[in-house]
Amino acid sequence: MTNESDSGRIIGHVVDVINASARHEEPFYHLQLVNVFPGDVYSALLEAMPRREDYRQMSGRTKFTRTNDGSGTRTKIDLFPEQIRHLPHEKKSVWMAIGKVLRSTEVREAFRRRLASSLEKRFGPDYTSVGMYPIPILTRDVPGYRISVHPDTRWKGMTVQLYLPRDRSIEHVGTVFHKRISETSFEKVLQMSFSPNTGYAFAVGQDTYHSVDTVGPEVQTRDSILLTYFVDRTPLQVVRNRMRRLGNFVLKG
């Protein structure tokens, strides 16, 4: 059974995957990740998926999309100990381990090294000293979910999404990357394949435009992990990032 004692092994594997990941320049610099977690760990997290009632509604852009019964089309669980403490023991052990791995310094610095050129472009030559506060969340999207073309807020430094389907039957619902061609229009350049144990990563910039097409009725759930590294450099950013975690804890109860 996967648990926190496996964290070292999993961290080493994830770092190796990041270091070996394919990099692409179009439409903006990004990494494409494959076999993100060891095979046994990926199987364990699929079996440890929480129940619908364990999630809570996502805020932000996604709050405007609704199912027929009025509930949100994207829900989430923050992968912090205080957010997953209510899960059954076996499920909690798995997600405790995954959360610890994704919040680790080793994983953060591996992404920083591989995304160095984009980070330096935004933050300058001292990009290695810019704080990056990791917030990993398990998300679940259902039919009706969509998100329009956007580059991500400047509060974010690096964006990572890890796909968690059981098979390759919904490959067509992956994130779409765009290039801006005018003030009001964008060109679709490529689409990620929503395949098991894969993902992508990029350093947030002015041109990192991406979207998700409306998820259709053929999809039961679109499960993934969003690992966001929030810029953690100024006093305001430091306080805001930690208050976000506290606020989520209070809302969940």
Image (cartoon, grey):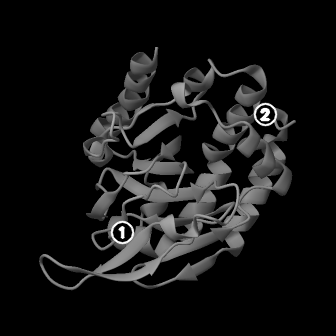
**Residue 174 visible in this rendered orientation of the protein:** no
> What is the three-letter code of the residue carrying label 1?
Gly
Look at label 2 and name its amino acid.
Glu
Look at the numbered disc 1 and give the secondary structure of its residue.
loop
Q: Earlier in the sequence, mark 2 or mark 1?
A: 2
Task: Identify the residue at horizontal 42%, vertical 23% (top origin).
Answer: 246
Bin the neighbour count of mark 1 within 10 Å (Cα to Cα): few under 14, some 14-19, many 20 and up: few
User: In the displayed structure, does residue 176 sit left or right of residue 33?
Assistant: left
From this view, report whether residue 30 is shown above or below residue 165. below
- Residue at 38% from the left image edge and 63% from the top image edge: 204
Residue 24 higher or lower than 165, as above or below: below
Say whether marks 2 and 1 touch (CB < 8 Å): no
Q: Residue 180, percent across and down?
A: 24, 80
* Furthest residue toward top: 253
Mark 2 residue element: helix
In the rendered image, which quarter contains the N terminus? top right
Q: Residues within 10 Å of mark 2 (few under 14, many from 20)?
A: some
C-alpha span from label 2 to label 1: 36 Å
Mark nearer the viewer, 2 or 1: 2
Residue depicted at 44% across the width and 38% down the height: 75
Q: Is residue 172 visible?
A: yes
- Residue 108 placement, left or right of 68: right
Q: Residue at x 56, y 73 (%)?
A: 31
Q: Which mark is residue 124?
A: 1
**x%, y% of residue 104?**
64, 45
> Residue 4, labelled with which disc?
2
Give the x, y percent position of residue 23: 57, 80
